Amino acid sequence: MSRTFVLPDLGEGLVEAEIRTLLVTEGDLIKEDAPLLEVETDKAQVEIPSPFAGRVEKIHVQPGQTVKVGQPLVSFGDAAGATASAPAAPRQSAPAAPVAVPKAPTSPPSAASSRQSMAAPAKADGVAVAATPSTRRLARELGVDLRGVQGTGPGGRITDDDVRGARGKPTAAAAPAASRAPAPSGPAKPLAAVGLEPPPLPKFEQWGPVERQPLSHLRRTIAERMALSAALIPHVTHFDKADVTDLNTMVTRSFETAKQHGITLTLTSFLLKAAALALHEHPQFNASLDPGAGELIFKRYCHLGIAVATERGLIVPVIRDADKKPVMELARELASLAQRVRDGKAALDDLRGGSFTITNIGALGGTGAIPIINYPEVAILGVARGREEPVVRGGRIVPRTMLPLSLTFDHRVADGADGARFTQAVIRRLEAPETLFAEW
Amino acid sequence: MVMGDLVTEVDVAVLGGGPGGYSAAFRCAELGLETVMIDAGHRLGGACLYEGCIPSKALLHVAAVLGEAERAKEFGVDFGEARISLDPMRKWKAERVVGKLARGLASVAKAKGVAVIGGRGAFEDSRSIRVGGDEPQVVRFKHAILATGSVPVMPPELAIGSDRIMDSTAALEVPDIPERMLVVGGGYIGLELGQVYAALGSRVTLVELTEGLLPGVDRDLVQPLARRCEKLFAAIHLGRKVSALKPSAGAIEAAIEGEAPQTFDRVLVAVGRRAVTESLGLEATRAALTERGFVAIDERCRTGDPHLYAIGDVTGEPMLAHRAMRQGKVAAECIAGRPSAFDNVAVPAVVFTDPEVAWCGVMEAPAGREVKVAKFSWAASGRAATIGRSDGLTKLIVDAASNRVIGAGIVGPGAGELIAEAALAIETAVTAEDLAVTIHAHPTLSESLMEGAESLLHRSSP
């Protein structure tokens, strides 16, 4: 019997995804949980494992194509020769009928239907996965395969936190497919309009040859969000500079010690800490405006987005509760998060829930930039390259390392003076680095 | 569909009104789905309420009272000879037990807005069921839940068309108290009903095909029950087959292999149950059957047909009402789009004999794993001594690597109640230490679980 696998529910609110890479071809004999294809959503690139074992009969999608949840992806033929390795069921006796009616193992599904999920049965090597029923339900909700989760509770019990921590990690230890060339782009689609209808474009062909190329899913998402933010939010930018000479010395001095702990200490982790502390002082920058309700929504959490340039485009992963974590922890998280993002392995929850964003373009040079606010946040802190400059101190010219900062914020929520004060609050901490280290 | 058909349109149609079916229907209604139930007998409760769990437990309670009265002589209380009147007993069972519960279910269905249609239903296709009988109509649904249950098996060589040959349904009616009764089958139904009739005064002969009572259950759990049955029953023939039955002068002559022909007044055939899958129009859907004739489902209770779910006995062993009830809720939640699954680790099983036998989880080491087994004899239980029942045993199976409780078996009075704690422990991945340090009231039989767990702790860390 032929079975068809449809695009599973990928999580809150996501209704579609773009097919990036096919990891199987028609005729392949594959095992259950083997990687099937990679999809890219608004938020992340996700590898989808096969729910079935069997021969790939038909692939219904192509790289670049956008598919909706529930749309067929792959059909499977009979599982001849590649039956899922169902472990022999442990003897879980029932009141046996007296005549020799052998106990039946739980019947496998004869066919699959819609709403296939990525969650997996709760058995591993003959013993049930150690998790309470509510934790198993959470795993199904988050699409976590419990068989791959290491439990931290007594007797190896998997806790809710273990499940949340495992969210978004690839479910099968699958060998990466040989070729994962970037997907050719699919058909182009219009951007969602933001208020103004763009006027028609001139015929560029009249001035020379042109080539049209559809936007990638991520590019389109960025374009739509930037246009939305720029159109809705009256942006205003405040510039200043921080003297990070002492901070630099401290980073250099601690670099080796941190390295021994496997941590690459960077200026950005201090920026995160300084911004988190400044946000505590100026909560209107850790907020969102609800124009419909005429209310300002203050976030009682501090999740900092950090812009990361990837080959595919700009992605903003989020560090949760940055205000509660010491600098070393922030550095560690930042490194692993950035790596996940660059590898296209970030989980959806790595990428959402931010309340303020920092974009550090210093590595690429520049003396300052005016970033666009990450809607619906209130502000974004831009950081350019720190340089040694002649600075006048006590009537003398001294060389100091100055870091250019720009705070771009929503003028509906805050005024120029507020922006200046907030920026000063960041600078004050960067210039007194011992306050940032205090929480080690 | 024929013109003029009465058509009912619903979100969910539940076929079968047993415990699985009504649990599913009630959950569907709670989740805001418009739901109807179709039941051939126009009743809620199914075999469980009318010809299974509930009436058999009512009769076993009668047997237990008789047994306790007999035991009371040991401590100086003699009630004299019991006088048994079948009419009041049947009336009590039918009205005060079954009837009361049936009325309760009907009022719950009404309160939840679940309509019950009486009549046999058969699928016309994946979206409609045709219902016959007094309320002929077509029910069109978005999803259906198949919960048609099971019926007793009657081997052809024993089906000789005599009303002296009873299945469990007939035996629960207690038409009379036969002087000589043959029970074919030493599983839980044969043992429970055999004990009922023995307590009422029948001379019971039990024949079991395999070498022991309760095939498949651990021998150390069965032994106290076997000893009790040896006292209660006139004869127990193990490893024997009843090869033929024939009517003879107002009785039944039975040919039991290796025995001279014997005559009985009534015969109870309790050799198992089979799924009800025929005449349901399943061939008009994409649902498939397993090799053993059960409806194939996955852990979300989905059949091969995207519109059709199946739960309970029709989906296979263990054929237990509580499994069906959980599956019913899973099916309802999946239909409502919730991330539900029947991923339960422990399905407790209880034999309500005297003594009761109960178990759940794994009873022997799964492949590649080592287990530790603790046995706590009730001879060391204060509570067991006070009720004169020191023959019980509590057994725990613990995964050696993680110390998690993965199985339990209990034999003794109240084992069916005691197993609940073990089921919770297994389902929630409790370790032996958790169980050992949880305070259990003294003196109770539940201490035996704590004691068993504690003995393992001392063994692992001397």
Image (cartoon, coloured by chain):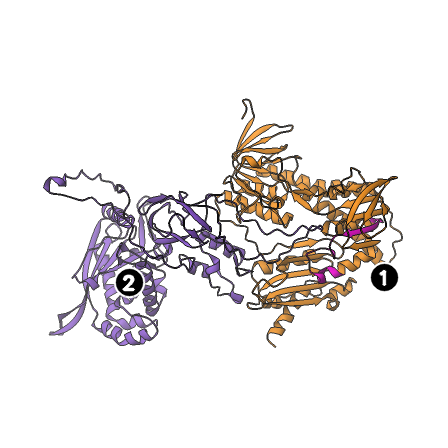
Chain colours: A purple, B orange
Q: Is residue A332 above or below residue A9?
A: below
Q: Nearer the viewer, residue A234 or B370?
A: B370
Q: What is the x, y in percent for residue A104?
A: 61, 51
Mark 1 and mark 2: Cα distance apart in space? 82 Å
| A101 lies left or right of A165 | right
Q: Is residue B205 magenta?
A: yes
Q: What is the x, y in percent for residue A34?
A: 42, 55
Q: What is the x, y in percent for residue A308?
A: 27, 59
| B303 lies left or right of A211 | right
Q: Chain of mark 2?
A: A
Q: State the residue position of label 2.
A: A275
Q: Is residue A413 above or below residue B90?
A: below
| A341 lies left or right of B407 | left
Q: For mark 2, give the secondary structure.
A: helix
Q: State the residue position of label 1.
A: B74
Magenta highlight range: B200-223
Q: Is residue B444 visible?
A: no
| A271 lies left or right of B423 | left
User: What amino acid type should be assigned to the residue bearing mark 1?
Assistant: Glu
- Crowd tier of the residue under label 1, counting other residues whose Cα lies within 10 Å: few below 14, some 14–19, many 20 or above: few
- Crowd tier of the residue under label 2, counting other residues whose Cα lies within 10 Å: few below 14, some 14–19, many 20 or above: many
User: What amino acid type should be assigned to the residue bearing mark 2?
Assistant: Ala
